[in-house]
């Protein structure tokens, strides 16, 4: 369904959605097709094993280390492709769920998520609407009458109708995103009206305003919890997480799967808001995956491996092969939440 690099995988997916997704930033509770949110009778009795890790003391890590598989975006292929293979190994995984996509065509509904959780899987938040929660620097000076701006990444341009903030720390304006413009090889973010004041390149960032940050982080968690799931970890959309994200995320989550991208191994005592994750099938050198598993087993470290099951190259065979490699080395497979409990430095500032 989607192609290209993994980074644009999320991006394409977001931009291909029903336009209603991007029109109204105040409405994240719609589009619950299929599954009835009130139908959650059994869910409160569940998952006893998931509550005991909520302590402030780190559990001891398994001797041969552990690995967490994090599958992105909640496509139905997580259930049809990855789940059966994981079940053969009795190996749980973590799915990053964009709360407004639950039950949409080609995505998992509540009942699929319940089946995963019953098998020990974890539901992680991937925000309400797959919003970028990082800030991006502006690369070209902005004139007052400019409507097109040129950030290092144009993620915000994929979320039409959302309000963004441009700020240099002293001055700030809020504008609404119209979409993407500019050249194909150099796309820009287009606003519905002129910026209204000049801003300097390098000193200025584009980001979501505070209110939007709180809303997307809180409401995705709340909505998934209303379905009966315990949700306390975050998967940052587009693999983008920085100091702007850090101002908000620890208020709602105990850690993030992918603060750092392009490396997979975390040492005992790592900061759960600096977790390293990388892909293990798409974009991956498979022999590097194997040698990372050697290192994880040798060092008793914690690996976080990601994949988009919607991609054709992410096959059951390659998932199975990876789980065999993990098994052969005596590495435990656990959820991200459990990985934090066993390997991360407990954070005291969380609510
Ligand atoms: Zn994503």
Image: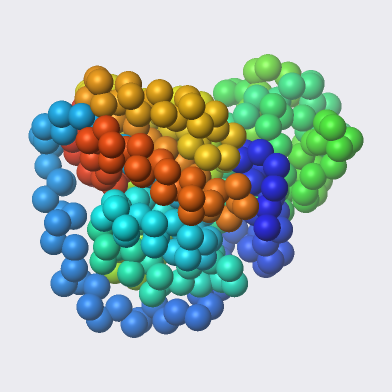
- Mark count: 0
Which residue is depicted at the point 57% across and 23% down?
169
Which residue is depicted at the point 15% across and 29% down?
63
In this view, the residue in front, 22 or 240, is 240
When asked about the image quadrant of residue 182, the answer is top right
Q: Is residue 260 left or right of residue 200?
A: left
Query: Quick one: quadrant of the N terminus?
Result: bottom right
Which residue is depicted at the point 60% across and 47% down?
313
Colour scheme employed for the rendering of this structure: rainbow
When asked about the image quadrant of residue 348, the answer is top left
When asked about the image quadrant of residue 59, the answer is top left
Would residue 155 be visible to someone looking at this image? no
Q: Is residue 4 left or right of residue 194?
A: left
Q: Position of residue 76 (x, y in %)?
A: 51, 65
Would residue 65 be visible to someone looking at this image? yes
**73 vs 321: above or below:** below
**16 vs 184: above or below:** below
Q: Position of residue 53 (x, y in %)?
A: 15, 46
In this view, the residue in front, 199 or 71, is 71
**152 vs 30: above or below:** above
Q: Residue furthest right?
A: 183
Q: Is residue 126 left or right of residue 226?
A: right
Q: Position of residue 270 (x, y in %)?
A: 28, 24
Which residue is depicted at the point 64% across and 33% down?
206
Q: Position of residue 24 (x, y in %)?
A: 63, 62
Query: Quick one: quadrant of the C terminus?
Result: top left
């Amino acid at each position: 369904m989607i192609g290209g690099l993994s980074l644009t995988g999320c991006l394409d997916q977001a931009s291909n959605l029903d336009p209603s997704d991007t029109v109204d930033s105040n409405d994240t509770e719609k589009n619950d097709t299929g599954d009835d949110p009130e139908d959650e009778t059994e869910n409160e009795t569940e998952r006893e094993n998931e509550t005991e890790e909520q302590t402030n003391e780190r559990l001891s890590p398994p001797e041969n280390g552990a690995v967490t598989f994090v599958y992105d975006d909640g496509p139905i292929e997580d259930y049809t492709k990855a789940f059966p293979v994981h079940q053969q190994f009795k190996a749980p995984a973590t799915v990053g769920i964009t709360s407004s996509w639950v039950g949409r065509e080609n995505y998992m509904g509540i009942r699929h998520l319940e089946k995963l959780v019953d098998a020990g899987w974890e539901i992680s938040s991937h925000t309400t609407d797959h919003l970028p929660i990082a800030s991006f620097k502006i690369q070209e000076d902005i004139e007052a009458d400019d409507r097109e701006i040129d950030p290092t990444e144009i993620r915000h341009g994929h979320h039409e109708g959302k309000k963004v903030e441009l700020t240099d720390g002293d001055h700030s304006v809020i504008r609404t995103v119209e979409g993407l413009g500019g050249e194909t090889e150099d796309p820009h973010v287009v606003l519905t009206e002129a910026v209204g004041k000049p801003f300097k390149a390098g000193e200025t960032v584009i980001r979501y305003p505070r209110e939007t940050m709180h809303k997307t982080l809180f409401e995705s968690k709340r909505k998934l919890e209303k379905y009966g799931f315990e949700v306390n970890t975050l998967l940052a959309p587009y693999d983008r997480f920085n100091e702007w994200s850090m101002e908000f995320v620890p208020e709602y989550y105990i850690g993030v799967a992918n603060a750092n991208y392009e490396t997979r191994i975390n040492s005992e005592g790592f900061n759960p808001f600096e977790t390293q994750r990388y892909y293990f099938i798409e974009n991956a050198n498979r022999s590097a995956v194997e040698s990372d598993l050697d290192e994880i087993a040798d060092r008793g470290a914690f690996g976080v491996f990601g994949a988009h099951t919607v991609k054709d190259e992410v096959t059951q065979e390659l998932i199975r092969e990876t789980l065999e490699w993990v098994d052969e080395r005596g590495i435990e497979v656990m959820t991200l939440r459990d990985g934090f409990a066993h390997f991360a430095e407990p954070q005291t500032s969380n609510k």
